[in-house]
Image (cartoon, rainbow, N blue to C red):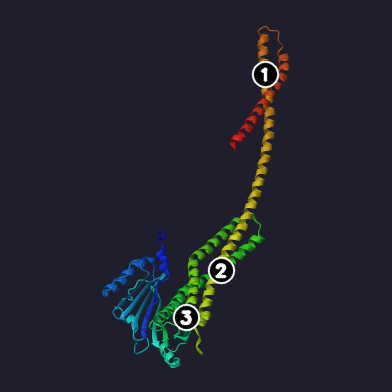
């Protein structure tokens, strides 16, 4: 007995077996369509597929299914749900009188494809035919691909041949021709699936190219604005411009971050899809045919530069974000230093004012002492006069003369005592305040 299974054990174990290739017998026709679809449309998509199945008396896929295949009469139908798109593949046995004249998708009910939710990103027809003893001649390839330049190679290290022109033809479909030399049934299914996936992942990767082209001029504008602001910061030391410069840098930072937010998912997906394209090409195990460009060479010359353009714009946006942040930090530091200087000057000014207020207070205290002495001595003089009027042997002038120094000393001692008590109270309140 084993311990309890991890909740995801069987799902993870089955993941490597997901989307197995179809078993194909030569000759046949295939139609492949990849539809970009929003998450909100997934339920309607499932209902559309379920209606097709019910029409043919076939059990529909489960709601959470990511892959489904069924035999619908003479048509083999396959549906795959991916993160951003859904893929539909139809297989019909036999060949049409003329190349791609009667595709497998023609066996679907009228209007069923047009009613699919989403928008088409890839549509392709393919033919799996027995290989002749000789390579297809120029006339045969021109008939299949309307005279366009053909890309192709031996695949599976020589057990088959694959040709395409990677163009959308007048009917809205791309075209693939696979010649079977000694392909097994499953090998034929794998090879055809890889060709469809190469085309799908190529197109999904290229969805980032319009985004990169639109952002390139904006990155140049931001770069020029940042360079101009940096020069102003280096050349101008006026305090009144720093706040304006910081506001402008904040605006640039918001613009760059907005561009990053709007594009990084697409650029990241571009890199991932490009890696899948390269992996699927490697799985074809191509061997060169005389005078024909291989799929790997074609992608290296046409797809890789576009992917590198997207990567360059992505790196430039990240570089701009870092540079704006550095310049903003430098300017903020300069503003903080200037504010510290202003605060120091303000504190010095307040200290000077406090000293002036202390001197003024001491002057006022001296005047107050004189006033106190004057009034107290005046009162004593009145008392002395009253006493002399009452018959006491008192000389008011002598009383006033003697009282002046005594009152002055007492008043001075009283003021000093009051001042000392205030200092003690302030020194005692500071620890509690902190």
CA neighbours of label 2 inside 10 A, class few (<14), some (14 to 19), many (20+): few
Return the residue at label 3. 284
Q: Quadrant of the C terminus?
A: top right
Q: Are marks 3 and 2 in contact (CB under 8 Å)?
A: no
SS of the residue under disc 2: helix
The disc, 1 or 3, on the residue closer to the chain's N-terminal end is 3
Q: Which mark is residue 378?
A: 1
Q: Nearer the viewer, mark 3 or mark 2?
A: 3
Q: Are marks 1 and 3 in contact (CB under 8 Å)?
A: no
Q: Estimate the x, y position of residue 201 in percent, counting from the top left.
A: 45, 75
CA neighbours of label 3 inside 10 A, class few (<14), some (14 to 19), many (20+): many
Q: Is residue 398 visible?
A: yes
Q: Is residue 430 above or below residue 291?
A: above
SS of the residue under disc 1: helix
Residue at point 66%, 61% (across, down): 234
The disc, 1 or 2, on the residue closer to the chain's N-terminal end is 2
Instruction: Give residue 433's quadrant in the image.
Output: top right
SS of the residue under disc 3: helix
Q: Is residue 129 above or below residue 275?
A: below
The disc, 3 or 2, on the residue closer to the chain's N-terminal end is 3
Residue at point 65%, 7% (across, down): 390
The alpha-carbon separation of the residues under discs 1 and 2 comes to 92 Å
Closest to the observer: 147 or 95?
95
Left/right placement of residue 172 relative to residue 296 reads left
Q: Is residue 407 above or below residue 251?
A: above
Return the residue at label 2. 315
């Amino acid at each position: 007995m084993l311990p309890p299974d991890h909740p995801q054990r069987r799902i993870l174990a089955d993941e490597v077996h997901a989307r197995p290739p179809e078993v194909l017998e030569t000759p046949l026709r295939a139609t492949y369509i990849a539809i970009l679809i929003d998450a909100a449309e997934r339920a309607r998509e499932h209902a559309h597929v379920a209606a097709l199945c019910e029409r043919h008396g076939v059990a529909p896929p489960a709601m959470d299914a990511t892959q489904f295949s069924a035999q619908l009469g003479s048509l083999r139908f396959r549906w795959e749900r991916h993160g951003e798109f859904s893929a539909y593949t139809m297989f019909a046995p036999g060949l049409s009188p003329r190349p791609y004249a009667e595709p497998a998708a023609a066996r679907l009910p009228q209007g069923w494809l047009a009613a699919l939710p989403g928008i088409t990103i890839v549509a392709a027809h393919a033919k799996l035919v027995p290989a002749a003893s000789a390579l297809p001649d120029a006339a045969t390839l021109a008939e299949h691909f309307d005279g366009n330049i053909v890309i192709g190679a031996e695949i599976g290290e020589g057990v088959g041949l694959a040709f395409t022109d990677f163009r959308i033809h007048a009917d809205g479909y791309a075209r693939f021709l696979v010649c079977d030399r000694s392909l097994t049934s499953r090998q034929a299914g794998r090879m055809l699936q890889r060709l469809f996936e190469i085309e799908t992942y190529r197109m999904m990767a290229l969805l980032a190219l319009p985004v990169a082209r639109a952002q390139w001029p904006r990155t140049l504008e931001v770069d020029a604005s940042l360079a101009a602001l940096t020069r102003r910061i280096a050349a101008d030391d006026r305090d009144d411009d720093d706040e304006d410069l910081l506001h402008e840098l904040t605006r640039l930072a918001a613009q760059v971050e907005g561009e990053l937010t709007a594009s990084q998912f697409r650029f990241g997906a571009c890199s991932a899809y490009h890696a899948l394209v390269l992996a699927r090409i490697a799985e074809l195990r191509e061997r060169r045919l005389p005078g024909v460009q291989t799929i790997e060479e074609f992608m290296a010359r046409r797809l890789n530069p576009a992917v590198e353009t997207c990567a360059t714009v992505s790196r430039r946006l990240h570089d701009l974000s870092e540079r704006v942040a550095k310049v903003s930090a430098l300017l903020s530091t300069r503003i903080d230093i200037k504010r510290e200087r202003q605060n120091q000057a303000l504190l010095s000014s307040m200290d000077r004012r406090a000293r002036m207020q202390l001197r003024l207070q001491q002057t006022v205290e001296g005047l107050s002492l004189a006033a106190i002495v004057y009034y107290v001595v005046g009162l004593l003089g009145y008392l002395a006069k009253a006493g002399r009027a009452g018959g006491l042997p008192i000389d008011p002038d002598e009383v006033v003369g003697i009282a002046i120094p005594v009152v002055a000393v007492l008043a001075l001692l009283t003021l000093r005592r009051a001042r000392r008590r205030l200092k003690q109270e302030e020194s005692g309140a500071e620890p509690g305040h902190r």
